[in-house]
């Protein structure tokens, strides 16, 4: 059977989740590989959740929030934008390709953008293959790609 | 008070009044060509010369700047005065024999031909009669001090400094306004591209916003008021009897604490000049919907008459639907109101003129109560409805007969024919679009927008007036294009929602809240600074953080940041999310 990536999506309630809803009601085709977990704000996404997701075998994790300046909670996404780059470095050290973690902004009106990002991410993970822990040389290679 | 006699009539006037003003009060006309109420009398035309008799002494004086004296007798039509006036008028007429104001004045004084030889001058080129009105206006009233006299005698002329364009000129047009001979014309350059919002007629710098404005109080447009440019003018303050004009008033920012907000910021209309094929902004007689609405208004610039830019009644009018709406290049959505107001326009044009009326529509959407009936009625009135999107509006220049006409090219999709219809006037039905500042407003209230740019309601069917922010409601075209009945319905619903909270006296809050498990809290205070609502306080006695539940909105930022997992978010606890993860990744 062909490899189907399992991707966990953390979507903020106000923008991205509504955007995903819009993609749904607009009947925009998007890949079913992203499994969505709703949080009130992208700032609620505890780094532990992301690590836990990888630990449990997720091939990728995508965090989606409101565009900067649009946060329903004023500045929750500013906290996210600071956390994710650190986390990318951390997972690289763990031997996980940092491309498997992605942060994107999708507003409530961007159903098409949601679908586009989801499809892109799925294709990228499909190319990367199932999650595995790299040995040291591979990490360097992966870092060069990133 | 001073009493004097003018031509046998007794007049009582205030001290320091000029004879001219006193005569005016007595109803006696004294000719003058350089006098204006706006500025101090200048006494240059000498036409107002009258005989002032005081005792046995008689003098010829200029009435405009000679103040009245107790007991004097003024003769405005004595032989001496007539003789002097005749010479003055003859001299004036000989210099400007073809200037209309001079000829009219000469006619009034019964002078047909001057005895003096005229200079050979091109009066079409130089009609300045040197009355000095413009100079006085510019210096005394406007206080711009741009215009002045140069040279003497026959070479005297009104000039700009060094005969060049002056930076001090504010192009107020006061000189043009007072010039009696029409010699001064303003040349407004660099005006293209700076199109005022509506172009149907001029407006003064002090004006009543609309005839229906409440309160109906005039406002001053400080950007164009002369007083705010030079400190001069103040004519409005002079004529205002109750002294109600206050130039010192400033815009004020007031802070008002409220519990709930209804955002009803309305809409903008689509700028049709973007669609160059319709000639809006380049062709005369192509109007936007709002401009035409103004024209139809009985208190508008044409008092409700339908007139072309040339001031004539149009023989034919084209009304073009869907300008910028139902158009993938601009707005894909339907503006909803255009079909019906286009039909209203057709009805009013039919009512007020005998013009032939054409409606160019894509689909006629007469969706509301009584709307379809109205459509049928309009068709019965003889309005020609043509189904097809107009390709272009151009000037018709093919034949003499068509001169000045506009040609509307369109495919009649029902007849399958290409049409080119000559019309006098084109009315565009501009799309309703979200206001240009709607993004700023949206961020202010942290509400979302839908893909069309309008504010997003919480739920399209179940909650169409509230937004994602508690206590913020939306109504009207800020939420999406809608007509008046729909707007009233939505606004009433929003008002009812607001009142229901007020009546209850207490606010229900979402159960999603953060909470500190005090036994785990180490008192690191990381969460304190993270909260955008300052809902987290630090309890000094217990050395733990505490969430004030009424302030917390439940975003969970603090929960994610807590290093000891002491903070939990109701509804989104770590355990719940991890369980979700578990479930998703089996």
Image (spheres, rainbow, N blue to C red):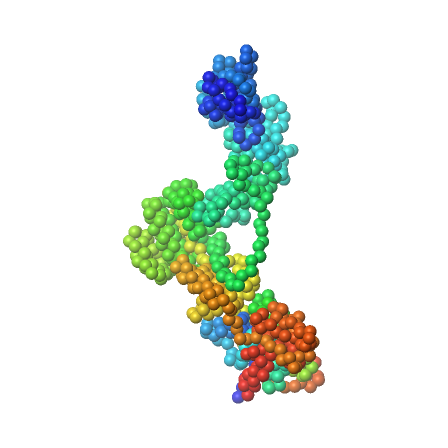
Residue lying at the far left in this picture: please name it. B380
Work out whether A21 lies above or below B137: below
Residue at image location 59% in from the left, 33% down from the top = B140
Q: Quadrant of the C terminus of chain B?
A: bottom right
Residue at image location 49% in from the left, 45% down from the top = B217
Q: Is residue A119 left or right of residue B370?
A: right
Q: Is residue B146 left or right of residue B490?
A: right
The x, y position of residue B6, in whole percent, is: 49, 19
The x, y position of residue A97, in whole percent, is: 65, 81
Residue lying at the far top in this picture: please name it. B56
Work out whether A52 lies above or below B80: below
Residue at image location 63% in from the left, 40% down from the top = B167
Q: Is residue B359 left or right of residue B40?
A: left
- Residue toward you, B175 or B98: B175
Work out whether B177 lies above or below B411: above
The x, y position of residue B562, in whole percent, is: 65, 77
Residue at image location 63% in from the left, 26% down from the top = B151
Camera sees residue A89: no
Camera sees residue B149: yes
């Amino acid at each position: 059977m062909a490899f189907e990536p399992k991707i966990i999506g953390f979507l903020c309630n106000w923008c991205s989740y509504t955007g995903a809803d819009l993609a749904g009601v607009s009947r925009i085709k998007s890949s079913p590989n992203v499994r969505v977990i709703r949080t009130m704000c992208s700032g609620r996404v505890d780094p532990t959740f992301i690590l836990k997701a990888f630990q449990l075998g997720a091939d990728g994790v995508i965090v989606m929030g409101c565009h900067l300046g649009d946060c329903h909670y004023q500045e929750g996404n500013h906290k996210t934008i600071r956390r994710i780059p650190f986390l990318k470095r951390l997972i690289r050290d763990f031997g996980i390709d940092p491309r498997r973690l992605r942060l994107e902004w999708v507003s409530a009106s961007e159903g098409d953008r949601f679908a586009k990002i989801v499809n892109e991410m799925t294709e990228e993970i499909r190319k990367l293959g199932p999650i595995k822990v790299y040995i040291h040389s591979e990490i360097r290679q992966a870092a060069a790609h990133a | 008070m001073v009493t004097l006699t003018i031509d046998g009539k007794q007049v009582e006037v205030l001290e320091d009044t000029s004879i001219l003003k006193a005569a005016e009060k007595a109803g006696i006309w004294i000719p003058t060509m350089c006098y204006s109420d706006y500025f101090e009398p200048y006494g240059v035309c000498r036409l107002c010369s009258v005989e002032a008799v005081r005792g046995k002494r008689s003098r010829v004086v200029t009435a405009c700047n000679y103040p009245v004296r107790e007991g004097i007798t003024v003769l405005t039509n004595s032989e001496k005065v007539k003789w002097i006036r005749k010479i003055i008028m003859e001299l004036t007429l000989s210099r400007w024999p073809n200037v209309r104001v001079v000829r009219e004045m000469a006619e009034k004084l019964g002078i047909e031909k001057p005895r003096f030889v005229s200079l050979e001058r091109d009066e079409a080129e130089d009609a300045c009669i040197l009355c000095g009105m413009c100079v006085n206006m510019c210096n005394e009233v406007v206080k711009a001090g741009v215009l002045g006299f140069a040279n003497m005698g026959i070479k005297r002329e009104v000039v700009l400094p060094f005969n060049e364009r002056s930076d001090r000129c504010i192009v107020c047009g006061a000189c043009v306004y007072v010039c009696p001979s029409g010699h001064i014309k303003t040349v407004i350059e660099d005006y293209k591209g700076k199109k005022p919002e509506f172009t149907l007629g001029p407006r003064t710098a002090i004006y009543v916003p609309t005839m229906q404005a409440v309160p109906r109080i005039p406002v001053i447009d400080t950007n164009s008021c002369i007083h705010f440019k030079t400190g001069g003018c103040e004519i409005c303050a002079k004529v205002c009897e109750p002294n109600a004009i206050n130039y010192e008033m400033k815009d004020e920012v007031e802070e008002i604490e409220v519990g709930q907000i209804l955002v009803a910021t309305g809409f903008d209309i689509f700028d049709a000049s973007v669609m160059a094929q319709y000639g809006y902004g380049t062709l005369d007689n192509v109007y936007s919907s709002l401009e035409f609405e103004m024209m139809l208004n009985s208190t508008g610039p044409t008092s409700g008459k339908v007139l072309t830019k040339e001031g004539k009644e149009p023989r034919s009018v084209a009304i073009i639907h869907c300008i910028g709406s139902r158009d993938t290049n601009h707005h894909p959505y339907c503006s909803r109101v255009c079909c019906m107001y286009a039909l209203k326009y057709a009805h009013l044009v039919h009512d007020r003129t005998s013009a032939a009326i054409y409606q160019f529509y894509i689909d006629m959407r007469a969706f509301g109560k009584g709307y379809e009936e109205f459509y049928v009625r309009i068709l019965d009135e003889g309005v020609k409805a043509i189904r097809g999107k107009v390709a272009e509006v151009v000037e018709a220049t093919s034949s003499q007969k068509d001169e000045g006409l506009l040609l509307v090219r369109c495919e009649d999709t029902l007849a399958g024919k290409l049409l080119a219809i000559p019309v006098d006037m084109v009315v565009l039905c501009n799309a309703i679009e979200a206001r240009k500042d709607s993004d700023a407003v949206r961020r202010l209230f942290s509400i979302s927008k839908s893909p069309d740019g309008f504010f997003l309601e919480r739920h399209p069917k179940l909650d169409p007036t509230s937004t994602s922010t508690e206590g913020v409601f939306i109504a009207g075209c800020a939420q999406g294009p809608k007509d008046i009945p729909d707007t009233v319905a939505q606004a009433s619903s929003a008002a009812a929602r607001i009142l229901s909270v007020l009546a209850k006296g207490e606010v229900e809050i979402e159960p999603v809240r953060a909470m500190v498990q005090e036994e785990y809290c180490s008192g690191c205070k990381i969460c304190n600074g993270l909260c955008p609502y300052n809902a987290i306080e630090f309890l000094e006695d217990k050395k733990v953080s505490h969430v004030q539940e009424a302030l917390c909105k439940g975003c969970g930022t603090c929960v994610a940041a807590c290093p000891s997992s002491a903070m939990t978010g109701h509804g989104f606890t770590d355990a719940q999310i991890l369980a979700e993860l578990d479930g998703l990744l089996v």
